[in-house]
Image: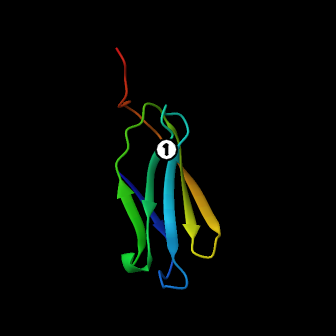
Amino acid sequence: PLTVKVDSLMTPQDFVKTIAVFNERNPQPNVALFYLNPRAGRATVSTRIRLGDSQNIVAIAQLSDGTFWSDKAELIVTLPACVES
């Protein structure tokens, strides 16, 4: 499970427009893209992700004023989900 939260008032004048989630090492680096508007009430999104190896997960939020915020977290994989035998 993966949850991304952005501190935003989510008003018509100040809200999060999109949240994108990427991984660094999987063959398909685009994990998810969420579109939000002020009616969402809060800028929190969740999804599930399968990883084959420990890596950084990056989230980028685009705000209504045109700015971008980003953060990353290191995920440690102890049992890979994408093992080929």
Mark 1: few/some/many CA within 10 Å (<14, 14-19, 20+): few
Residue under the image location 57 percent in, 75 percent down: 64
Q: Give the percent coordinates (x, y) of residue 41.
A: 38, 79
Kind of element beneath mark 1: strand
Q: Is 17 or 84 nearer to us in this picture?
A: 17
Q: In the image, 60: left or right of 11?
A: right
Q: Which residue sits furthest right?
A: 67
Nearer to me, 8 or 33: 33
Farthest top residue?
85
For the residue pair 66 and 41, the one nearer the viewer reads as 66
- In the rendered image, the quadrant that contains the C terminus is top left
Which residue was labeled with disc 1?
30
Q: Which residue occupies the foreground of this view, 84 or 34?
A: 34
Residue at image point 49% right, 44% down: 30
Identify the residue shown where x is 35% and y is 53%.
47
Rendered view: 15 above or below 53:
below
Q: Residue at x 44, y 79 (%)?
A: 38
In the rendered view, would you say 61 is above or below 38?
above
Looking at the picture, how far across and down is residue 73, in whole percent?
53, 51
The correct choice, above or below, for 25 with respect to 83 in the image is below
Residue 13 point in image, percent of width and height: 55, 85
Three-letter code, disc 1: Asn
Give coordinates of residue 44: x percent, y percent: 41, 67
Which of the 4 image quadrants contains residue 45? bottom left
